[in-house]
Amino acid sequence: MSEWKIVYTANADYHLHSIYHYIAYDLKNRDAANSLVIRIRKAIRNLENMPEIYKRFDSDLLKDENIRFFSVDNYDIIYMIDKVNKVVLITHITYRGRDLNRIIKYSNDLIK
């Protein structure tokens, strides 16, 4: 049984759906879309047992040891760790070419 609960924000859920839709329908490759979503979800599920395995997000905008990120293929997954409630909150799933500092700066999910 997992120690930590995984929760997706509405943003992260929307991002994952949009990635699937783009690859499956715009690029017309449903197999690739399914495969990518499976890989992303599997990597996220690994956080149930080891949420601190990936590196902290460290920038001038935000220094919080509980915000971390990792990549799957060309996508970055940003998440927060709530140690008190043992929750891993998936906040963003975004194309790797995007500016993570900008995403963090304008994110209501991460800045309190």
Image (tube, rainbow, N blue to C red):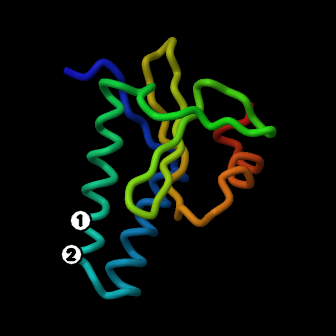
Residue bearing the label numbered 2: 31
Say what secondary structure mark 1 lies in: helix
| Residue lying at 32% horizontally and 79% vertically, measured from the top left | 24
- Nearer to us in this view, 91 or 59: 59
Q: Is residue 12 above or below residue 65?
A: below
- In the rendered structure, are the residues bearing label 2 and label 1 in contact, judged by CB atoms less than 8 Å apart? yes
Report the residue that reaches farthest toward the right. 60
Residue 15 is left or right of residue 102, and the answer is left
Residue at point 47%, 45% (across, down): 70
Identify the residue position indicated by label 1 in the image: 35
Residue most extreme to the top: 84
Q: Residue 111, image x and y in percent?
A: 73, 36
Q: Amino acid at mark 1?
A: Ser
Q: Which dot marks residue 5?
A: none
Quadrant into which the N terminus falls: top left
Work out whether 66 lies above or below 30.
above
Residue 5 lies, in percent from the top left, at: 36, 27
In the drawing, does residue 112 fall left or right of residue 5?
right
Where is residue 74, by image quadrant? bottom left
